[in-house]
Structures are given as structure tokens and as C-alpha cells.
Amino acid sequence: MRKGKQIKNPAWAHNEKIYNAVIDRPETSKVRHLASLGNFEKAYFGEEVSNEKPYNAILNLQQNSIAFAKVELLLEALLDHGKEPPLGALQWTSIAQLFATINQVIPPIRFE
């Protein structure tokens, strides 16, 4: 939602393409496909950011040891598939699973 209006996240159009590229690899076990629930900033910093995202992320990592630890766990989980991803990350196997999980974490807005 932005300025009181529900908008589509442009990343959704790419999620299935990315997943298909992952499963088309000859050795899919070497690829770990994770999604940040909501978006990166919401999942690991607990806040929505609309501008200066890279700068905001650097500030958060420098000033917030909890955020730093979450992102560190995320990177470790991407490299070592035996490690559990941090809260806010989802390893998914279908668009339906991703969509259902997102709707549990971020309930859909209903206009009544």
C-alpha cells in the first residue's frame, strides 16, 4: 500500500521466472532460493522504506546489531543450506506457497 492505495509489487512478476530458472539448473541442490517476507527492509529491519534504500540498509547494519545479526544469518543460510534462514525469510517451492505465506504475514487489505 502506498499513499492509501494498494499497489502491485513489480517483483511479483519476476518471482516465478526466478524460481523456474532455479529449478532448471542441472544441480538445483547448489542453489537456495529464499524470499524476504514483505520486502527486505520490513523482513530484517522491521520498517518500510520508500527511498534511499541502500543507504538506509547500510545505516541499519551499522547502527542496529539485531538487524546486522539477521542479515548475517540470511547470508550464512544462503551459503550453507544446512543453516536455518532467519525469521523473515522463506524458502519456497511454488508461487501459491509464497502467496499464502505472504498473506499470513501481511494480511490482504479488504475494501468493504
Image (cartoon, rainbow, N blue to C red):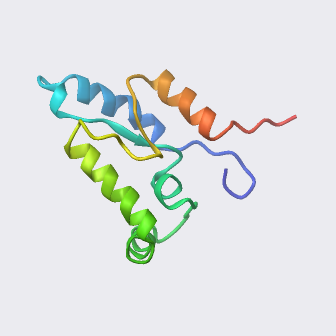
Examine the image and state in which quarter residue 94 appears: top left
Vertical position of residue 27 compared to residue 57: above or below? above
Instruction: Name the residue at the right extreme.
Output: 112
Vertical position of residue 79 compared to residue 72: above or below? above
Kindly identify the residue that appears in the image at 40 percent across and 56 percent down: 70
Pick the front one: 83 or 11? 83
Q: Residue 72 location, x and y as percent?
A: 31, 58
Pick the front one: 53 or 72? 72
Kindly identify the residue that appears in the image at 33 percent across and 50 percent down: 74
- Is residue 96 rendered to the left or right of residue 26? right
Examine the image and state in which quarter residue 89 appears: top left
Image quadrant in which the C terminus is located: top right
Q: Residue 20 location, x and y as percent?
A: 29, 25
Vertical position of residue 24 compared to residue 68: above or below? above
- Is residue 56 rendered to the left or right of residue 5? left
Kindly identify the residue that appears in the image at 67 percent across and 50 percent down: 1
- Is residue 14 rendered to the left or right of residue 47? left
Kindly identify the residue that appears in the image at 38 percent across and 76 percent down: 62
Instruction: Name the residue at the left extreme.
Output: 26
Vertical position of residue 26 compared to residue 72: above or below? above
- Is residue 19 rendered to the left or right of residue 100? left
Examine the image and state in which quarter residue 82 appears: top left
